[in-house]
Structures are given as C-alpha cells and as structure tokens.
C-alpha cells in the first residue's frame, strides 16, 4: 500500500494493486446483449424516438431546438445538475462497445458541444465555465445506455476547476513557468507514466489518481475547450479513441471522462486545458463498487491500479 499526493492539489490517494486480486463475493456473468436489446425498445435517444422524447433548446440558443452535426444531437438535460446542462447524443447506434467509437462521430460531438457552449455564452456572457463530460454505461452513473456526452456552461467554476486554476496560478507566480508544462516535461523525462505526445496534447497516467486506470490529457497551449481548432480536436479525439481501445482490451466496460477547462475568452498563461479519463466497474447485475466511504465521505481516493502499470498497459495503443 502506497500513499501518494497530487503534485498540484495535494489530494491524497492510496494505491494498492493487490486489492485488484481480493475476493469479491458479488459479481459474475451478466447478459449485456440482453440489457442492450431490452433498453433499445424504449430508448428516448434512439432514432425514431429522439425527436418526440427529448426537449428542445431555447430559441436564443438554437433556432431549430437541437444542435445537430453528423450523428450528434444536443438538447437540454431533463434532470440537470448545473446551469445550461445539456445532453449530446453521439451516435444513432443504441450501443457502441469501447472499440467502436469513430473519430468523425466523436469529433462531431465535441464540435457541436463547443457550438452549444459558445451559443449559451453569447446569450449569457456570465456563463463562462464549460464542462464536457461522459458517463458511459450504468456503473459510471450513466442512466441511459445510448452513448451521450453531458455539457454544462456555468457562471461559477466547479470547485475542482476553481482549485486547479488557483493552484496553477500560485505555481506560476512562484516558479514563473506553467505547472502543466513542467508536469508534462517531468513525466516525459521520468518515462514511468508518460504514454504519448500527440503534438497538441500529451497523455500521461496520473501520479496520484482519483480513479482506476486514470489517464490525463494535457493540452500544450490552450486553456479553454472553446479555443480548440478542428485539428486540435481531432488530435484529442484520436487520443481518446486509442485510450478507449486500450480500455476495451483491458476488459473495462464503463468509464467517466471530464474536461477541466479554463473560462471562455481568457487565454491563461498559467493554465492548460486538461481532461481525465477513469474506468468504472464492469457492468454486471451486482458488483463491487470502486468507491466507498474513503472517496464519498473522506476525500481520499483509493485505487487498485498502479499508474506506472496503467501507462505500460496503454502505451501499446498509442503507437
Ligand atoms: Zn438508444
């Protein structure tokens, strides 16, 4: 068992790879195909139902009511957890295995999300804090199987966003250089957790993860998700798809993705847009959860996956 602390936030994490082999009395086989087929029958995000079963965006955000691009359709979340909370259905297919996401499909989703974010911002100039996130399959807290992203545009940053920005600024003022550039360079030099250099962004396994198989995507120049050019988005999407293919090979069947974006319209020299991808338990009828009292009530992140092993596992998917 090892204690680690996030180099920027000092959040505590405890890693014990042996726990991955502990006895789990719950679990076993589940017929995923049956669940996919059954939920397809009434899925509100499937073609033929999506138009009648999902709400419309206000006219000032989108004249047509839903932002559409390729297979993506963006509309309001009926049960929001934040301001301007929208859903971005990514595919016409009801289910996509982790290795079935295409670059174009993913990029359309991200591009449409950016258009939505900018449109919200245009109608409310105080809405400057965008979040793009994913809950894939029920163990990730995704209630609908049909692949979809979630987009928020809030007037205040999420507490974690605020903390990252504050500490990044303090680091910059102390060292006269960017924490994020230093982090990438240090990880590149050490090699233990470095996975990939995508040109516009770097991919590493987090030193002190908050989740299992945690991977960080760190952009080299941009601080906000709205600053990304089509090429930068394509680079990001390509990296995500590689990571998901790696996850699939590792037997992972559920994940969360969150972008930690700086505010819209401010190019921050001390901050870089970054995102985290974590695996969640495999979808089974009843399973051993990956979070318990330490995570939910103590702000301590207990993980089974050693970051150095995560990097080693993932590297082959980033040739
Ligand atoms: Zn569906």
Image (spheres, rainbow, N blue to C red):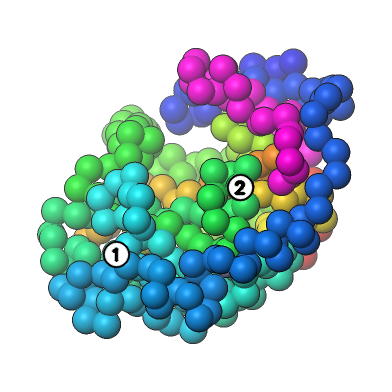
| Cα gap from disc 2 to disc 1, whole angstroms | 26 Å
Report whether 237 appears left or right of 254.
left
Quarter of the figure with residue 207: top right
Report whether 249 appears left or right of 37.
right
The answer to whether residue 300 is visible is yes
Q: Quadrant of the C terminus?
A: bottom right
Q: Secondary structure at mark 1?
A: helix
Quarter of the figure with residue 288: top right
Out of 62 and 36, give the one closest to the viewer. 36
Residue 120 percent location from the top left of the image = 22, 65
Give the residue number, with chain letter if any, for mark 2: 138
Image quadrant, ligand 1: bottom right
Quarter of the figure with residue 73: bottom left
Report the residue at 66% width, 49% height from top.
Answer: 254
Report the residue at 55% width, 66% height from top.
Answer: 43
**Does the stretch in magenta take in 82?**
no
Give the residue number, with chain letter if any, for mark 1: 117
Residue 74 higher or lower than 5, as above or below: below
**Marks 2 and 1 close (CB-CB < 8 Å):** no
Report the residue at 62% width, 74% height from top.
Answer: 93
Out of 31 and 278, give the one closest to the viewer. 31
Q: Secondary structure at mark 2?
A: helix
**Where does the magenta region start and end?**
283-309
């Amino acid at each position: 068992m090892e204690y680690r602390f996030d180099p920027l936030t000092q959040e505590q994490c405890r890693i014990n790879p042996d726990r991955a082999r502990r006895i789990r009395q719950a679990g076993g086989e589940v017929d995923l195909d049956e669940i996919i087929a059954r939920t397809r029958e009434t899925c509100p995000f499937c073609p033929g139902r999506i138009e009648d079963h999902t709400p419309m965006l206000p006219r000032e955000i989108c004249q047509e009511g839903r932002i559409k691009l390729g297979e993506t359709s963006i509309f309001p979340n009926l049960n929001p957890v934040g301001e301007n909370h929208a859903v971005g259905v990514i595919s016409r297919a009801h289910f996509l295995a982790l290795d079935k996401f295409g670059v174009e499909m993913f990029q359309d989703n991200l591009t449409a999300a950016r258009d939505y974010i900018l449109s919200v911002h245009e109608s409310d100039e105080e809405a400057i804090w965008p979040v793009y996130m994913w809950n894939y399959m029920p163990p990730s807290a995704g209630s609908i199987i049909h692949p979809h992203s979630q987009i928020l545009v809030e007037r205040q940053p999420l507490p974690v966003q605020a903390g990252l920005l504050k500490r990044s600024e303090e680091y910059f003022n102390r060292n006269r250089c960017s924490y994020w550039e230093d982090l990438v360079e240090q990880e590149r030099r050490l090699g233990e957790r470095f996975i990939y250099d995508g040109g516009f962004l770097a991919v590493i396994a987090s030193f002190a993860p908050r989740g299992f198989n945690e991977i960080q995507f760190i952009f080299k120049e941009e601080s906000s998700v709205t600053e990304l050019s089509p090429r930068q988005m394509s680079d990001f999407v390509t990296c995500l798809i590689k990571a998901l293919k790696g996850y699939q090979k590792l037997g992972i069947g559920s994940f969360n993705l969150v972008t930690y974006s700086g505010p819209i319209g401010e190019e921050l020299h001390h901050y870089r847009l970054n995102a985290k991808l974590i695996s969640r338990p495999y979808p089974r009828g009843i399973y051993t959860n990956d979070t318990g009292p330490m995570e939910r009530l103590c702000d301590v992140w207990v993980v089974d996956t050693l970051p150095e092993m995560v990097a080693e596992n993932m590297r082959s998917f980033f040739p």
